[in-house]
Amino acid sequence: MSVNATTDANVCLATIDFLEYQGLARILHHCLIRYPEQKLIQDLKECDIAGSWPEFGLREQNRAGRHLLGGYLQQMTLNAMGEMDAATLIELKLDYGQLFFGPGEPNAVPQGSVYLSEEQLFNDRSTMALIDFYRANGIELQMDFPQPIDHIGLFFAVLDQSFGRVAAEPNNQVLARMIQVLLQLHLLPWAFRCFELAHQYAATDFYRGVALLGYDFLQQLQQDFQILPIATRLYR
């Protein structure tokens, strides 16, 4: 699979707040990589994440995502200890499990190779290509537990690190090019479908909102980094 020639153009990074982008990628990483915990949800509520999330191009996914996530967090009451109701947390955990983890096959499998492999296998050729890409670019991941490296939450961890580097090195076109290739070849071909499925099957407005905001953020990155979508067959 080759990179479209359009991506060879230098990317203008000066107008983008990459510290903000780093923060958004970090939030999506924490929301997608593991079961929700009390502190994460409380922190998102206290910082009014939906109200502070950038509007970007005023796309419908952005508006609806902020509305759903904001409404969910706003109506969620905390007790005198500042903690959410145990039943609400259990509901979120169950929703995360059926979307991204199991038991059984998740409705929105978070690993890219399942979408890109005709046999819908984990750790297939696309995963091996991603491992080679990370090795060639000196990217190392710290994981709390073993899992396929092409988990969508891990992609946002890499984007978190990369955006932090771009913020410190705004003229580093090699780094910008690396992010372009990561997005175009390894993430965007399947991640929109993952978020579509997450939105379709989510049982809570929390994960419906997260799915829509994740989808919209990828659209914004596609625009910022001047990426043309690659025609790729998806197998779910």
Image: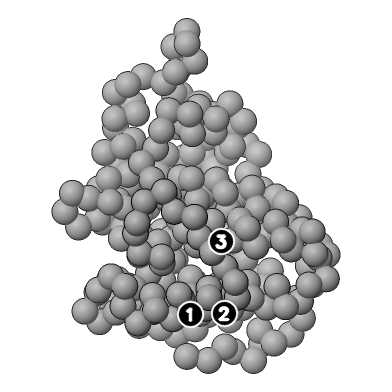
Circle 3 packing at 10 Å, graded few (<14), some (14-19), many (20+), is many
Locate residue 221 relative to residue 165 in the image: left or right: left
Element type at marker 3?
helix
Circles 2 and 3, Cβ within 8 Å, touching? The answer is no
Q: Residue at x 29, y 30 (%)?
A: 90
- C-alpha gap between disc 3 and disc 1: 15 Å
Q: Percent x, y for residue 194? A: 38, 62
Q: Nearer the viewer, mark 2 or mark 3?
A: 2
Element type at marker 2?
helix
Q: Residue at x 65, y 53 (%)?
A: 22
- In this rendering, the count of numbered labels is 3
Which residue is tagged 2?
136
Q: Percent x, y for residue 129? A: 44, 81
- Residue type at mark 1: give it: Asp
Tag shown at residue 150: none
Tag shown at residue 132: 1
